[in-house]
């Protein structure tokens, strides 16, 4: 049975504010302010392939955890469980799984077609920049929505746990960038530190969001953003052009 | 970008009552009585890989539409729209899509491990027998359930439209098979005929469910099941043994 293999070709790639793994929200939709694009490969940059999709509010994206490709574990330690209790990989959404396939439900904010390119504007992104996309499907509430389904150790969404303060140097950069401020605030509020670090922890963390290097640390119950430094030209001109 | 390819290996195969494409419900969960198994490949028949999954009521299955492999269309005619209006393939769940990947939300009824085999008992199956499975993930209502999401032309579930009557010869076979009766009744109630056939239609239809060939026709507002004939040994001994 396991001799049935399938060869997948990326139909799109993700243009995401998250330029490195650290800090990415642990499920889609947790950070609504995380907006990006699905940039279709030239072969699929055809408006007729999307006709009717504009009537749907959310879309499923099947993608590859390309930064974990070829690696899997049978048991994982979900951050939900404090990072010290193991569960089976198939009871988790861990990227370290056979076939490294991911599934995210994103908000569909718009479909743009110009100059032979076709891009979907999406929100609630939990995807690394440049992630390869293998399928896009409409969300069908009558088949997909089961709000009351029992869900073991993941019954409640992770709540924002940190208040986020911006220091003076950070404020200078954010002054004319309200969307970036909101994105950083929502992302850090979820406390992206590894579970085993939570508690007393004086270290400085850095994460790359869009074209910025964000430096922060945790003080008691809040995250203090110290600096936000532009790190050269963005490699996703499409994003900066319309954001 | 489209040069990013992924090579998938089946981690399981589906043991389904649906032995041919005709008659399969058009989404998962429409026929709750459609029960089957996900039979894990030997490499993944390891209980530790499933620990914690028993607390989840539903699971996502990412699979391959293996009977349509390598074929896609940019525009499709969903049965929802009567089979005569086209939409883009990405606005549909059609199997004729790039990469031929499918996504189904199934009920998880149990996990069995014995003699080195591991199988998940699933309900609400909309999968062809022998379908290759590439991933299994827990359903997380906080991320996956959006009952109010706008969903264009697929806002309502397809309703059962036919009453189902069993003729005398069918009744003989069903006498001690209440589960099979329920499965056939729920499946035919949704009217699996091609959309363009609906209306006046005197032809006889046949479909294979489990080890039976089911023959029926439509009379006005009901389906009349004329014969149910066993068709030799079932090639899924696991199913018949526990069903």
Image: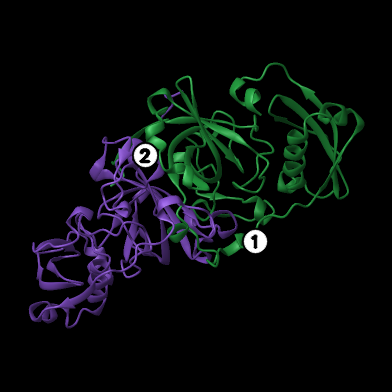
Chain colours: A purple, B green
Residue A221 position, x and y percent, is 21, 72
Q: Residues within 10 Å of mark 2 (few under 14, many from 20)?
A: many
Dot 2 falls on which chain?
A
**Image position of B1 (left or right of B204):** left
Q: Residues within 10 Å of mark 1 (few under 14, many from 20)?
A: few
Say how many tags the image has.
2
**Image position of B77 (left or right of A159):** right
Residue A229 position, x and y percent, is 9, 69
Q: Which residue is tagged 2?
A: A88
Residue B90 position, x and y percent, is 48, 53
Where residue B8 sits, quadrant-wise, is: top left
SS at mark 2 in the image: strand
Dot 1 falls on which chain?
B
Q: Are marks 1 and 2 in contact (CB under 8 Å)?
A: no
Q: Nearer the viewer, residue B91 or A158?
A: A158
SS at mark 1 in the image: loop
Q: Which mark is residue B32?
A: none
Q: CA distance from mark 1 to mark 2?
A: 35 Å
Q: Is residue B94 above or below residue A158?
A: above
Q: Is residue A223 above or below residue B160?
A: below
Q: Is residue A8 above or below residue A12?
A: above
Residue sitting at x 68%, y 28%: B210
Residue sitting at x 37%, y 46%: A92
Q: Which residue is tagged 1?
A: B156
Q: Is residue A229 in view from this perspective?
A: yes
Residue B238 position, x and y percent, is 59, 23
Q: Nearer the viewer, residue B90 or A108?
A: A108
Residue sitting at x 18%, y 59%: A235
Where residue B224 sits, quadrant-wise, is: top right
Q: Is residue A6 in view from this perspective?
A: no
Where residue B205 sits, quadrant-wise, is: top right
């Amino acid at each position: 049975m396991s001799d049935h293999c399938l060869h997948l070709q990326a139909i799109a790639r993700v243009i995401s504010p998250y330029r490195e793994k650290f800090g990415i929200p642990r499920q889609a939709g947790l950070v609504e302010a995380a907006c990006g694009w699905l940039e279709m490969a030239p072969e699929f940059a055809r408006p007729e392939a999307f006709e009717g999709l504009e009537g749907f509010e959310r879309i499923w994206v099947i993608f590859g955890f390309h930064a974990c490709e070829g690696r899997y574990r049978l048991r994982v330690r979900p951050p939900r469980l404090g990072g010290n209790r193991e569960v089976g990989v198939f009871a988790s959404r861990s990227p370290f799984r056979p076939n490294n396939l991911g599934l995210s439900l994103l908000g569909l904010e718009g479909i743009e077609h110009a100059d032979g390119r076709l891009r979907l504007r999406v929100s609630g992104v939990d995807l690394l920049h440049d992630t390869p996309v293998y399928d896009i499907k409409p969300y069908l509430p009558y088949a997909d929505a089961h709000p009351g389904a029992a869900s073991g150790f993941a019954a409640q969404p992770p709540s924002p746990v940190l208040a986020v303060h911006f220091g003076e140097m950070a404020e200078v950069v954010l002054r004319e960038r309200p969307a970036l401020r909101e994105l950083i605030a929502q992302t850090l509020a979820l406390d992206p530190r590894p579970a085993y670090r939570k508690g007393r922890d004086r270290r400085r963390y850095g994460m790359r969001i869009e074209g910025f290097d964000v430096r922060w640390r945790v003080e008691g119950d809040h995250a203090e953003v110290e600096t936000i430094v532009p790190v050269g030209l963005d490699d996703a001109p499409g994003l900066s052009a319309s954001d």
